[in-house]
Amino acid sequence: MRNRDGHSIELFLIRHGETLYNKEGRYLGVTDLPLTKEAQQNLVKQEMPQVEFLFASPMLRARQTADIVFPKQPYVVMEEFAEMNFGEFEGKNYRELNGNPAYQAYIDSGGSTPFPGGESRDAFVMRTMTGFTKVLMQVGKEERPVRVGIVAHGGTVMAIASSLLGGEYFSYRVQNGGYLHLRGYREEKRKITWNIIS
């Protein structure tokens, strides 16, 4: 997607493979769990788009995913792409939190209130988009179409996609090992216009 005035950015927002906490439906933010053996085997067989620029969360599960699906390709670790801090909910699932007043208040808010002892969604999105701005500053120097991959977390994908495309944060959920494909088009000296491809 290109014309004489600008260039395109193909963006792949990739969620890491499955961990034990993911399998058990537990909140997984700051706990640095590895991928399950099954997830690693599944990722080896999974086809991923080729990218020229690759970025990853510092968390082990994201780095393992990047190492498997983009073997031998170097990537830049972005601290800003770490998953949300779920505070007191970390490591717990719905059944264990059922009846917890703080959890009920979070649910009633539509997920907009801060996690007790953790981050708010607004703070998390702001942190994530600070990192994404750094990515754009790097790849935006290219005067040609570029393909960019970000290997991170479900929250990271939702934060970036909802910020770029608008709409409901949770509508951009992707499964472990899945991704969203976006295309951004930048005209000279103008902001990037983004669309979702798949």
Image (tube, rainbow, N blue to C red):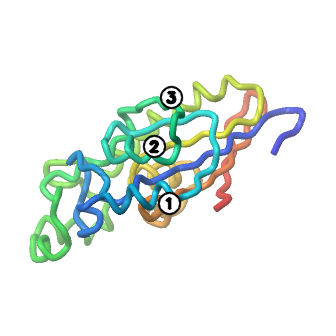
Query: Looking at the image, is mark 1 or mark 2 nearer the viewer?
Result: 2
Question: Which badge, 3 or 2, comes first in the chain's sequence?
Answer: 2
Above/below status of 96 relative to 5: below
The residue tagged 3 is 134
- Dot 2 falls on a residue whose secondary structure is helix
- Dot 1 falls on a residue whose secondary structure is loop
Q: Where is residue 86 shown, x and y percent of the image?
A: 22, 53
The label number, if any, that marks residue 121 in the structure image: none
Question: Which badge, 1 or 3, comes first in the chain's sequence?
Answer: 3
The residue tagged 1 is 178
Identify the amino acid type marked 2: Ala
Residue displayed at 58% across by 52% down: 48
The label number, if any, that marks residue 66 in the structure image: 2
Among the 4 quarters of the image, the one containing residue 11: top right
Real-space Cα separation, disc 3 to disc 2, in angstroms: 19 Å
Identify the amino acid type marked 3: Lys
Q: Quadrant of the C terminus?
A: bottom right
Residue displayed at 77% across by 30% down: 144
